[in-house]
Image (cartoon, grey):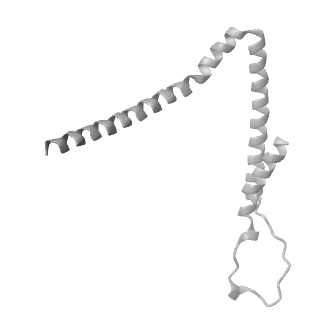
Amino acid sequence: MKCLLMLFIALLCVVPASAAHRHIPSRHRVSTPRKTPVVVPWKTVAAGGAAAGTLVAAYKVSDGVEEGIKTVAKENPEAFADSLSVLTWPVRWAAMILFLVFGCGVAKKWLEHKTNLTRKDKK
C-alpha cells in the first residue's frame, strides 16, 4: 500500500510538467483538430523515476532501522536507552532554544507593557 502511495506521489510530480498542459494560442489552431500523441520529455520521466526510487529506498531503509531498533531494545535495553539519548539530543536542544526565545519574547512584551503603565501614571 505504501509503495502505491509513493508511486502516486511521484506521478503527481511528473504529470503537471507534461506537454498536455501547455496552452496553445487560438490564432495558431487549425480548423480541424489533429490527433497528435502527447510526448513527455525523457527528463521528466527520469525525474519521476528518480523520485519514486528515492521514496522506495527511504521506505526500505526505515524498515531496516525499525527492525534493528526493536532487536536492540529486546536484547540490550541499556544500549537502547543510550542510543535514544544520542538520537534525541538535537530535539531537546531545539526545544530548549525555542522555549528561551519564546520566554524572552514574553518577558520583553511584559516589560514594555509595565513601562507603558508607569509612564501613563506619571502624566
State which quarter of the image contains the N terminus. top right
- Up the image or down, 109 lies above or below 49; here it is above
Give how far across and how far down residue 94 sits, in percent. Answer: 51, 30
- Up the image or down, 34 lies above or below 18; here it is below
Answer with the quarter of the image where residue 111 lies.
top left
82 with respect to 92 (left or right): right
Number of numbered discs:
0
Q: Which is nearer the eye, 100 or 50?
A: 100
Answer with the quarter of the image where residue 110 lies.
top left
Task: Tell me which residue sits at (53%, 25%) in the image.
Answer: 92
Q: Which is nearer the eye, 37 or 66?
A: 66
51 with respect to 84 (left or right): right
Give how far across and how far down residue 120 sits, in percent. Answer: 19, 45
Residue that protrudes farthest toward the left in the picture:
123
Q: Which is nearer the eye, 100 or 6?
A: 100
Task: Tell me which residue sits at (80%, 47%) in the image.
Answer: 5
Give how far across and how far down residue 60 sits, in percent. Answer: 79, 33
Give how far across and how far down residue 96 sits, in percent. Answer: 47, 27
Task: Tell me which residue sits at (77%, 10%) in the image.
Answer: 75
- Up the image or down, 35 lies above or below 116; here it is below
Answer with the quarter of the image where residue 106 lies.
top left
Residue that protrudes farthest toward the bottom in the picture:
31
Task: Tell me which residue sits at (50%, 26%) in the image.
Answer: 93
